[in-house]
């Protein structure tokens, strides 16, 4: 791919520039334009419980949340938004409220009377997902679009009259059958689904809306947002609507934070994103500092001058994942490059600190000592050094030199574009190695954003975490980043949605219970979903699913197919284990579980 074609979604892939968007107003809060990146979250209380909802909204606002979302699954729930909004305002809190709508246009019309913004999901606002396979003629497809227009237009008209904002928020897990049959389960289908609704709004001269393209897989999420921005640019300069970022069903703990950082951080580094929500399977209050930390580097960043050493080609397709090709080499007896799994390096000092307990580290062990790896460090702008490497007869491990004044994502993109593909690349999270303990979460998020972004673009044959001083923590971070980016699966993978008012069981305790029972199943992917809204679609990549079907009742899935129904919650984890066993993927847990290093 040549550089011009690749830059459709980003002014300069080798230097930071924030995407220029119009301003959308959510009450007094501006999104896009010259506004800072806004921080959002969603309460978890039942929308009919006014005191609980008000309490949670006020707590989120006090923590720095600027926009708060509340589920409104039916018209009855939506009607109580009047009471919630009244009590929130009576408490002196002016944070804008958003109604989250799935399936029920009448709920959206009721909610728009009381809150400042409506989130609609194009995949289920006017469609009922049945997983039907059918061919649509062009005429039949146009009939479907007219049906959608008839369903959606009343909400657009009401929001326009009342001055409400809207988010047209596509979810990878809930694309309609019509979109799935024409475009498949793809980023393109996600984009086209949103554009159909946007065209209706624009035809009615309504422009106070933002887009989102959420997915639980960071690769899919990144590609979908990039494709969205590229398509908006193709449509014309007045399609410059703001973008809301989020990785849906990210999970909890470090895994949830890392997965969110890969998806959100990668896009923010490319100048995409005007508002963010980090979706964790934890109390919503814990989402705020993570979102703030991800946005912080870009709240004060200004657009840079064009990159000083433009590449003639990118070396990768930003809209479709393919791992960068390289030739195999050996380092300390370990194979890397040439399609081998991405290797984990560490410094001699950290290696020595961990050496006495290698047998206890299991899959978290370092594999190669950086100082003994024979890696060649270069400034990717140094044409002479690059030319020397490209003229060498043997493939060599190459990395970017420390102390350089480029951001890691931009530096390694430039290196990959100028270096012969036969040379494997060693990624670093930072070019300023830590010399003392720093606050862990910010450096973890930085590492995940930088390395994860590059891995999702197919760049990188080995990684080195330098920004985390503690040896055990740096190893754990390295392997968890590889897992979250989908390039090296070494433990059970979980897709777990955040709690909300639709949730039919305690997601946090249930997720922990499932982790405790299944965490030793290397390579098995399990989805834990509080309700059915995004369940079947988000579970398309999962082997098994645990989904709330009714209060106290669980449905179990294989892939996106429900196979066990209405299981009492107190039996459901055991029945999940039975299902995994039936499909030949259960193994007994080791007698002495291997814990992640501290």
Image (cartoon, rainbow, N blue to C red):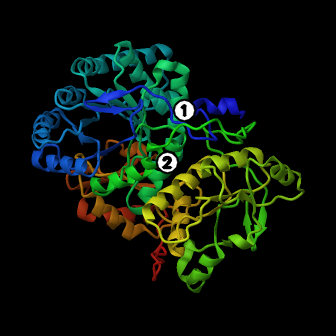
In the rendered image, the vertical position of residue 195 relative to residue 270, given as above or below:
above
Residue at 54% x, 35% y is 226
Which residue carries the number 1 mark? 227
Residue at 74% x, 47% y is 381
Left or right, 484 with respect to 578, comes to right
Query: Viewer-nearest of labels 2 and 1?
Result: 2
Q: Nearer the viewer, residue 447 or 296?
A: 296
In the rendered image, the vertical position of residue 434 relative to residue 133, given as above or below:
below
Q: Nearer the viewer, residue 149 or 262?
A: 262
Q: Nearer the viewer, residue 434 or 49?
A: 434
User: Can the viewer see residue 494 in this picture?
Assistant: no
User: Can the viewer see residue 38 in this picture?
Assistant: yes
- Please tell me how crowded label 2 is: few (under 14), some (14-19), or many (20+) other residues with Cα within 10 Å: many
- Please tell me how crowded label 1 is: few (under 14), some (14-19), or many (20+) other residues with Cα within 10 Å: many
Q: Secondary structure at mark 2?
A: helix
Which residue carries the number 2 mark? 265
Left or right, 561 with respect to 16, comes to left
Which of the labelled discs sits on residue 423, or is there none?
none
Q: CA distance from mark 2 to mark 1?
A: 17 Å
In the rendered image, the vertical position of residue 381 relative to residue 230, given as above or below:
below
Q: Quadrant of the N terminus?
A: top right
Dividing the picture into quadrants, the one containing residue 3 is top right
Q: Secondary structure at mark 1?
A: helix
In the rendered image, residue 84, in percent from the top left (x then y), is placed at 13, 40
Residue at 59% x, 65% y is 433
In the rendered image, residue 231, in percent from the top left (x then y), is placed at 53, 26
Dividing the picture into quadrants, the one containing residue 369 is bottom right
Of the numbered discs 2 and 1, the one sitting upstream in the chain is 1
């Amino acid at each position: 791919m040549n550089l011009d074609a690749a830059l459709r979604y980003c002014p300069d892939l080798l230097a930071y520039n924030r995407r220029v968007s119009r301003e959308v107003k959510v009450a007094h809060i501006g999104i896009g334009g010259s506004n800072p990146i806004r921080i959002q979250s969603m309460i978890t209380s039942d929308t009919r419980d006014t005191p609980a909802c008000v309490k949670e909204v006020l707590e989120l606002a006090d923590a720095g949340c600027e926009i708060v979302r509340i589920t409104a699954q039916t018209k009855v729930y939506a009607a109580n938004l009047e009471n919630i909004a009244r009590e929130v305002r009576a408490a002196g809190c002016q944070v804008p409220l958003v109604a989250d709508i799935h399936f029920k246009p009448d709920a959206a019309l009721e909610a728009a009377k009381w809150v400042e913004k409506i989130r609609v999901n194009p995949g289920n606002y006017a469609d009922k997902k049945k997983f039907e396979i059918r061919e649509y003629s062009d005429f039949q497809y146009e009939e479907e679009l007219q049906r959608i227009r008839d369903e959606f237009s009343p909400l657009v008209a009401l929001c326009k009259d009342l001055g409400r904002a809207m988010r047209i928020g596509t979810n990878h897990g809930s694309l309609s059958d019509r979109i799935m049959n024409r475009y498949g389960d793809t980023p393109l289908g996600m984009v086209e689904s949103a554009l159909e609704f946007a065209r209706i709004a624009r035809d009615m001269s309504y422009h106070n809306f933002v887009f989102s393209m959420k997915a639980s897989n960071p690769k899919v999420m990144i590609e979908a947002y990039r494709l969205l921005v590229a398509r908006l640019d193709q449509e014309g300069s007045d399609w410059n609507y703001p973008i809301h970022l989020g990785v849906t069903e990210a999970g909890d703990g470090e895994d949830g934070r890392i997965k969110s950082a890969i998806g959100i951080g990668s896009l923010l580094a490319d100048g995409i994103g005007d508002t963010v929500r980090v979706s964790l399977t934890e109390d919503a209050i814990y989402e705020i500092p993570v979102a703030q930390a991800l946005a912080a580097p870009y709240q004060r960043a200004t657009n840079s001058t064009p990159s000083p050493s433009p590449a003639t080609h990118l070396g990768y397709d930003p809209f479709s994942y393919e791992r960068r090709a390289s030739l195999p080499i050996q380092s300390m007896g370990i194979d890397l490059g040439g399609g081998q799994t991405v290797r984990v390096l560490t410094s001699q000092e950290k290696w020595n600190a961990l050496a006495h307990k290698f047998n206890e580290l299991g899959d978290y062990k370092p594999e190669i000592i950086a100082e003994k790896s024979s890696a060649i460090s270069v400034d990717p702008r140094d044409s002479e050094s690059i030319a020397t490497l490209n003229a060498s007869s043997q493939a060599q491990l190459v990395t970017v030199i420390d102390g350089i004044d480029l951001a890691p994502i931009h530096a390694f993109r430039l290196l990959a574009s100028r270096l012969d593909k036969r040379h494997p690349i060693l990624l670093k999270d930072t070019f300023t190695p830590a010399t003392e303990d720093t606050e862990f979460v910010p450096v973890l998020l930085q590492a995940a954003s930088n390395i994860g972004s590059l891995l999702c673009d197919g760049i990188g044959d080995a990684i080195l975490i330098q920004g985390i001083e503690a040896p055990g923590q740096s190893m754990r971070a390295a392997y968890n980043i590889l897992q979250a980016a989908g390039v090296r699966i070494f433990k059970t993978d979980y897709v777990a949605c955040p709690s909300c008012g639709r949730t039919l069981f305690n997601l946090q305790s249930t997720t922990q219970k499932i982790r405790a029972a299944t965490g030793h199943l290397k390579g098995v992917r399990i989805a834990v979903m509080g309700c059915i809204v995004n369940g079947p679609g988000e579970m398309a990549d999962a082997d098994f699913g645990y989904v709330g079907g009714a209060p106290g009742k669980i449905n179990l899935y294989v892939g996106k197919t429900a196979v066990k129904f209405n299981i009492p919650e107190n039996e459901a984890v055991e029945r999940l284990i039975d299902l995994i066993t039936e499909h030949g993927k259960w193994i007994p847990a080791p007698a002495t579980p291997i814990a992640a290093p501290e």
